[in-house]
Image: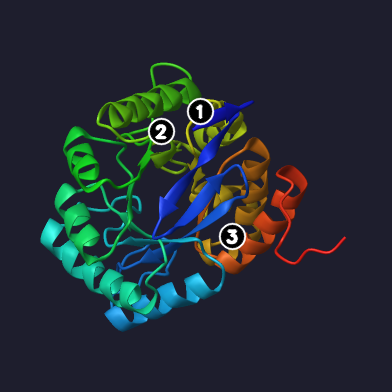
Amino acid sequence: MVHTGDRVTGALRLRGGELRWGARTYIMAIVNVTPDSFSGDGLVGVSDAAAHATEQWRAGAHILDVGGESTRPGHRRLDENVEIARVVPVIRSFRAAFSAAPISIDSYKPGVVRAAHAAGADLVNSVWGAPDALLDVVAELEMPIVAMHNQNGTQYDGPVVDAVLTYLEACASRAVARGLAPDRVILDPGIGFGKTAEQNIAVLEALPRLVGLGFPTLIGTSRKSTLGKLIGREPKDRVYATVATTAFAIAAGVDIVRVHDVRAARDATAVTDALVRGWRPDGWIE
């Protein structure tokens, strides 16, 4: 992995393919296997969830992010065995149908990650950064990790952006110390987690500083409440607002966008990547 200005280059190799950092923006599709998702898209039946994952993949997703515990405001920590029972059958079903598709497990629990990996998951998406117990499992299984900033409450001793970047830099340092290559450590500033709407906006405004840390980056603004406050719409009607933040994040150099609405994200990334990254679709003719 090397630096080119404020952007990182290198590749995340998964299932025989690769995501080349800086070449284009990648879409991580949300597959909520929960009955209480904030966005109203949670699915608990294996067949329904697997069908949704298939739809997201065929719509143009590059990674499928399967999660079994809701992170909506006021949620309760889910028993590990219940979470495993929700996500593992979905991962197995989708993996059987699509052998080469990268699958992420949206969990911070070592036991869930281990079970998901055995079922076919390739990388970890942790909403609680990179705790040591999780890094032990990630390093053992040689899985890449998305480490997200999070905290209880919205009080910070100093500027929120400084706190977020310090937290993420510490996560990355611990992960690299455990033997993970820097281009397999992806940093997420945690929009909507431990932050007020104003703090979320401040973090979004500072995305170039996040990219400047020198690691691959991910942003998850899809249907979030801050967008709802700005436009006055319910979660399912926040697609255009999400697209706006997607284009903004790409312009800042962010590598992955985590979304509910893959088709909209695909169009937004294609156009913005063409303008920002010089990307062109296969078969492009001048």
The amino acid pointed to by label 3 is Arg
Q: Are marks 2 and 1 in contact (CB under 8 Å)?
A: yes
Q: Which residue is drawn at 68% across and 63% down?
A: 267
Q: Name the residue under label 2.
A: 182
Q: Mark 3 points at which residue?
A: 238
Residue 155 in sight in this render: no
Mark 2–mark 1 Cα distance, whole angstroms, equals 8 Å
The amino acid pointed to by label 1 is Gly
Q: Which residue is drawn at 28% across and 32% down?
A: 179
Say left or right for 60 vs 286: left
Task: Mark 2 or mark 3: name the one nearer the start of the chain.
Answer: 2
The amino acid pointed to by label 2 is Pro
Q: Which residue is drawn at 46% across and 25% down?
A: 160
Residue 106 in sight in this render: yes
Q: Position of residue 176 (x, y in %)?
A: 32, 29
15, above or below 143, in the image: below
Camera-nearest label, 2 or 3: 2
Q: Which of 196 and 121 is in front in this view?
A: 121
Q: Mark 1 points at which residue?
A: 214
Q: Position of residue 232 (x, y in %)?
A: 61, 55
Q: How many other residues sit within 10 Å of disc 2, few (<14), some (14-19) or many (≥20)?
A: many
Task: Mark 1 or mark 3: name the one nearer the start of the chain.
Answer: 1
Q: Where is residue 32 in the image (x, y as percent from the top left)?
A: 36, 65
Q: What element carries label 2?
A: helix
238, above or below 33, in the image: above
Q: Where is residue 135 in the image (x, y as percent from the top left)?
A: 23, 38
